[in-house]
Each structure stands twice: as structure tokens, then as C-alpha cells.
Image (cartoon, rainbow, N blue to C red):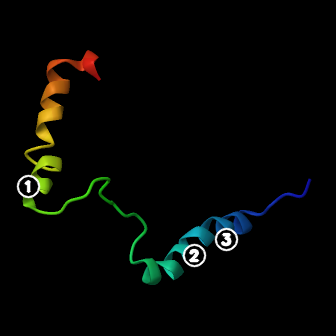
Amino acid sequence: MEKISKEDLIKKASKPAEDAMKLHPFYKGKIEIASKVCIRDFTDFAIWYTPGVAEPCKAIHKNKDAV
């Protein structure tokens, strides 16, 4: 089996970072957060986000076995 040099390993390890930098301008980032539900107005938003998100958390805190 051929031994790989340290320099070759470093070069190989840097490839994903180089690729990421090439793709970054196109994608403008790498991770996106998208809503699973339709948010039509502030009322919908309030249900799915604070304070609406707190109620399920409070219920879980009170009864962890319910999860």
C-alpha cells in the first residue's frame, strides 16, 4: 500500500474549503431555515413563533413523559 505524504493529506483536506468558497457567492450561504407551515399574517406568525412556541415548551417542561 502506498503511503500518502503529509502534504498530500493537507492538500486533500483543504479541497472542501476551496469548493465551499467557490460555491458561496452563488448560494449566499450554506444553510437555510424554511417554515414548515404557511404564514400568511402576524396572527399565523404568533402561533408558530414566540409567544406561540413557548406553550408547547411549557407543556413539555411540566410533563416530559407526554413527549
Measuring 56% from the left and 76% from the top, which residue is drawn there? 18
Horizontal and vertical percent for residue 54?
A: 12, 39
**Element type where label 1 sits in the image:** helix
In this view, the residue in front, 19 or 29, is 29
Q: Is residue 25 above or below residue 67?
A: below
- Residue in view at x 14 percent, y 54 percent: 44
Kindly report the distance in space between the C-alpha atoms of the residues bearing marks 3 and 1.
52 Å
Q: Is residue 44 left or right of residue 6?
A: left
Image: 32 above or below 58: below
Disc 3 target residue: 11
- What is the crowding at mark 1: few (fewer than 14 residues within 10 Å), some, or many (at least 20)? few
* Nearer the observer, 8 or 42: 42
**Residue positioned 15% across, 50% down in the render:** 49
Q: Work out how far the residue at label 3 is from the one at label 2, CA to CA, in angstroms.
A: 13 Å
Query: Which residue is under mark 2?
Result: 19
4, above or below 57, in the image = below
Q: Which mark is residue 43?
A: 1
Question: Which tag is nearer the camera, tag 1 or tag 2?
Answer: 1
Residue 12, position in %: x, y? Answer: 68, 67
Q: Residue at x 25, y 58 (%)?
A: 38
Q: Choose between 27 and 41: the one closer to the eye.
A: 41
